[in-house]
Amino acid sequence: MEIDENTVAKLLHQQFPHLSHLPIEPVRKPGWDNVTFRLGEALSVRLPSNASYAAAVRKEAQVLAALGDHLSAEVPSVVAVGEPCEAFPLPWSIRRWIVGETLETAEDIYQETFATSLGRVLCELRAIEAGNGPLAGRHSFYRGCHPSVYGDEVQQSLEILEGKVDKARCLEIWQQGTTSAWTDRPVWFHGDVAVGNIIVADNSVKALIDFGCCGIGDPACDFVMAWTYFEDEARKAFRDACATDKQTWQRARAWALWKALVCLSGLSSPDTDGTHARALQAICNDT
């Protein structure tokens, strides 16, 4: 959908006129699942980029307040949820703006210190009482489920990439990661722990944002940054800080393998900066 400042202005004028005087500015990186605009100094407007992401709007409004009370890192609080209308056919939200720089653009990060901080926050997230949290499924794009849910995409990607990747090694890693399952009670997971969804300060996690894929289930999907971001020693520090068992770590590696393969094969968003090519190499070299 075409989403721009005029769209936001119309929505504010119709549904939240007391905020319509505030300046609207697109953020530098608007996102894939949602398009985000800065609203004044303290707020942001977030609109799903298509209908498949719309379910996350009300979900986040329900869970973020509860999760934020138990985490040492900040989470974006939802100020209001907008209703579908002629100007925009999906629900949307207004949130508090969290000041800071994402890990994607931050410089001079000491990886081992950051790895420990991120692992600690993810442990805090898992420890929160799950209660009636949303069970993993379509709303989370199957994050929190077993990685085998995407086995067909792994197989298709390997066929497309025939001769370009180590197929035997990929299949070995996939088998290791899909022959175990989470047998504990369902726990909270973020679902998209990535460099663009972490705000950093002093080599630590200041805030986790974009909980659109969150839910309760298997937390293995939250450890993918071990291969997409961290280098060898920092990867070990991250694993230690995450305090997880070998089988969960292998499922996490299977999640990372799936993501790298679908991006490299063209089944998902393209690997424009080489992140997933480097991740695949780290995944295959890891033991």
Image (cartoon, helix red, strand yellow):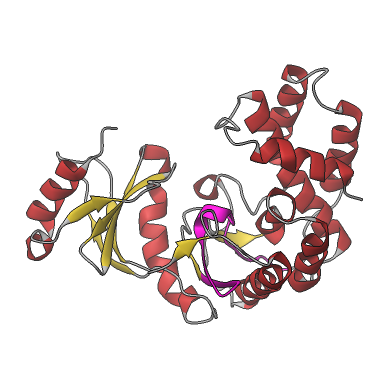
- x 42%, y 67%: residue: 100
Q: Quadrant of residue 62?
A: bottom left
> Residue 139: x percent and y percent?
50, 48
Q: Is residue 177 left or right of residue 126?
A: right
Residue 197 among magenta residues = yes
Q: Quadrant of residue 141?
A: top right
Residue lying furthest front in this view?
Answer: 108
68 displayed left or right of 250: left
Q: Which residues are magenta?
A: 185-206
* Left or right position of 190 against 221: left
User: x, y percentage for residue 70?
Assistant: 53, 81
| Residue toward you, 266 or 127 | 266
Specify whether residue 218 is in view: no
The residue at the point 64 percent across, 54 percent down is 144
**Residue 268 falls in which quadrant of the image?**
top right
Count how many numbered circles sit on residues in the image. Answer: 0
The quarter of the picture where the N terminus appears is: top left
Q: Position of residue 272 (x, y in %)?
A: 57, 32
Residue 20 appears in the rendering:
yes
Q: Is residue 57 above or below residue 49?
A: below
Magenta stretch: includes residue 40: no
Q: Is residue 136 above or below residue 189?
A: above
Q: Residue at x 36, y 64 (%)?
A: 61
> Where is residue 29 drawn, in percent x and y?
40, 47
Vertical placement of 236 versus 90: above or below? below
